[in-house]
């Protein structure tokens, strides 16, 4: 059966839709993926010309699948309503937004797939092909004659190694590029592939969609955290390396890769070093980082690691229910700093949170000042994803009344938009946002360490929190600078040939 899968992601790097595609192909279906990427503009929706091109791809398909993040859900809605008016084929809406906000999605689409979709999508496609009823297919919500059938989710896949590798047969993939849908090419990978080596998260921070996944599956499985075996990962990565000669690195995107036990990491590193011989990036969690794991990863080729701090100890424990102490962060940072010549470290923090107090933000800044340098600081402004625990709380308490208040239409890094939307602790949130960037002994991004200390003098903080005039003026200047960077500098870098970027990285990392 012919099936068209549509990704609304800003970048064509989805693993989820590629895995769904592999499952369908394995079941004998003829699948193509259209990546409706809009990497040049985070906020744009599709125009008629683009939708008409997509329509041509969908005409001959017996099933159409579409995915979305909360941030791309408007794009998905536009595509679905456009296609529904012109075609009779069933459209199924899946992905993280459908999993977390099925109520939202069923308003625009008659079929919504909640949760892990590997088996559900194959069952759906087979049922459609064989003209069988789809009403009892687990994971599916079905709108029928103004009634909604809400089937429960099936169990999570126990053995992740049974899943086929994500689909990288790019001759069956298409990409929206500069208002035209064209064939996907290797250079669209931009020299890197995101790779997930597991699923689920052992934590369940209140702002994160994992808090909801844990809830959704709590009666289905004790642990939603599952890992692929090192052998499976290496087999997959090796295949991709052979297939795409311009690949420059792998980006292992598990939120808590360092949670894996030592034996697993040892095995993975041994195989990676012997067979892959290419640098990689990964993410770690302060509590599970230890010296041996880090030295193994570096020896295998890890050049970059991202560590989530998120908030001060108080913010983490009282607002996010994230079990992490400042001491965990400092312990991990001391280990990482031992390898500063070989490993680039980026710390992630979140601010612009409606529940944060000025003291919480100051504590976070003080913690950042204690972390051994150098490092890179990524400052993200809070987005309340529909359905996450923090979003539920904020809605109940009246802090979020409309979609706009939740800020999920905004990019995490859009500091001006977030600060103006939330208007809380503006002075301190701006300081933290200005600290984003490279951190050296004397500087945090735009600000010098001594300037931060000057700006944080208690009297100054009090005054500027009461009167926002100075903050607003600086915010305008920063907004202008960010605009130039987004509109001119970044597109220029993206337009550089992949080979140049590969060469640049090689020089930079001496590999
Ligand atoms: C890798 C990653 C990225 C990558 C690649 C994104 C991409 N295009 O895939 C990068 C770094 C670019 C990225 C960017 C962002 N990300 Co991100 N990212 C992830 C991460 C870590 C892994 C995604 C993944 O591959 N998962 C594994 C696959 C197998 O799971 P899955 O995608 O959910 O797919 C399953 C189901 O959803 C379903 N499914 C998926 N597609 C389809 C399609 C159909 C038709 C059907 C039926 C089913 C279906 O079946 C799949 C298999 O079971 C997740 C967290 C996580 N662990 O999932 C966050 C996550 C998806 N990101 C998130 C966010 C917010 C973002 C940003 C918006 C952040 C920002 N800058 O503001 C951006 C922008 C993304 C965009 N607009 O395109 C949030 C989304 C929350 C939400 N409710 O929307 C997540 C969940 C993180 C979180 N903890 O909250 N991200
Ligand atoms: S540790 Fe990361 S992925 Fe896990 S629940 Fe918290 S924010 Fe989400």
Image: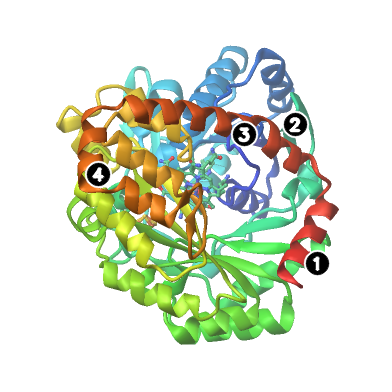
Tell me the colour scheme of the image.
rainbow
Task: Measure how far apart labels 1 and 2 are at the Cα level.
Answer: 26 Å
Task: Measure how far apart labels 2 and 4 are at the Cα level.
Answer: 36 Å
Left or right of residue 39, residue 508 in this image: right
- Residue 85, by quadrant, is top right
Q: Residue at x 67, y 57 (%)?
A: 193
- Identify the secondary structure beneath mark 4: helix
- What residue is pinned by disc 4? 389
Task: Measure how far apart labels 4 and 1 are at the Cα level.
Answer: 43 Å
- Identify the secondary structure beneath mark 1: helix
Q: Position of residue 182 (x, y in %)?
A: 80, 33
- What residue is pinned by disc 3? 486
Q: Residue 333, relative to residue 132: is it above or below?
A: below
Q: Nearer the viewer, mark 3 or mark 4?
A: 3
- What residue is pinned by disc 1? 242
Which residue occupies the foreground of this view, 51 or 370?
A: 370
Left or right of residue 396, residue 170 in this image: right
Q: Nearer the viewer, mark 1 or mark 3?
A: 3
């Amino acid at each position: 059966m012919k099936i068209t899968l549509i990704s609304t992601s800003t970048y064509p790097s989805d693993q989820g839709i590629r895995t769904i595609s592999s499952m369908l192909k394995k079941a004998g279906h003829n699948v193509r993926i259209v990546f409706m990427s809009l990497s040049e503009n985070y906020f744009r929706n599709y125009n008629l010309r683009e939708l008409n091109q997509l329509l041509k791809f969908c005409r001959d398909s017996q099933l159409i699948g579409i995915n979305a993040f909360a941030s791309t859900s408007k794009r998905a809605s536009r595509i679905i309503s456009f296609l529904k008016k012109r075609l009779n084929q069933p459209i199924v809406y899946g992905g993280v937004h459908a999993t977390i906000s099925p109520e939202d999605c069923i308003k625009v689409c008659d079929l919504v797939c909640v949760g892990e979709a590997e088996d559900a999508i194959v069952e759906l496609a087979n049922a459609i092909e064989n003209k069988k009823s789809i009403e009892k297919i687990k994971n599916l919500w079905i709108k029928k004659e103004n009634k909604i059938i809400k089937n429960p989710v099936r169990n999570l896949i126990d053995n992740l190694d049974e899943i086929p590798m994500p689909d990288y047969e790019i001759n069956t993939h298409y990409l929206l590029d500069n208002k035209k849908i064209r064939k996907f090419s290797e250079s669209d990978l931009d020299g890197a592939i995101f790779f997930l080596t597991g699923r689920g998260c052992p934590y369940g921070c209140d702002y994160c969609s994992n808090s909801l996944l844990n809830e959704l599956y709590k009666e289905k499985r004790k642990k939603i955290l599952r890992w692929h075996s090192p052998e499976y990962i290496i087999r997959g990565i090796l295949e991709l390396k052979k297939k795409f000669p311009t690949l420059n690195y792998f980006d292992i995107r598990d939120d808590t890769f360092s949670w894996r036990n030592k034996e697993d990491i040892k095995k993975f590193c041994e195989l990676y070093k012997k067979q892959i011989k290419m640098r990689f990036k990964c993410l770690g969690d302060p509590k599970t980082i230890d010296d041996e794991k880090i030295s193994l990863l570096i020896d295998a080729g890890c050049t970059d690691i991202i560590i989530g701090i998120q908030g001060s100890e108080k913010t983490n424990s009282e607002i996010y229910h994230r079990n992490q102490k400042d001491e965990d962060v400092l312990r991990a940072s001391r280990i990482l700093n031992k390898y500063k010549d070989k490993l680039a470290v980026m710390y992630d923090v979140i601010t612009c949170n409606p529940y944060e107090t000025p003291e919480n933000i100051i504590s976070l800044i003080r913690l950042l000042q204690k972390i051994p340098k150098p490092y890179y600081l990524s400052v993200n402004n809070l987005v309340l994803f529909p359905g996450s625990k923090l979003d539920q709380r904020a809605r109940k308490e009246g802090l979020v009344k409309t979609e706009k208040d939740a800020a999920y239409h905004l990019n995490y890094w859009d500091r001006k938009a977030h600060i103006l939307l939330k208007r809380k602790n503006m002075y301190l949130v701006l300081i933290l946002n200005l600290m984003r960037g490279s951190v050296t002994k004397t500087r945090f991004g735009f600000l010098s360490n001594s300037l931060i200390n000057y700006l944080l003098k208690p009297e100054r903080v009090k005054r500027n929190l009461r009167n926002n005039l100075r903050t607003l003026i600086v915010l305008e200047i920063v907004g202008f600078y960010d605009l130039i960077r987004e509109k001119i500098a970044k597109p220029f870098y993206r337009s550089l040939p992949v080979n140049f970027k590969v060469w640049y990285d090689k020089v930079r990392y001496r590999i």
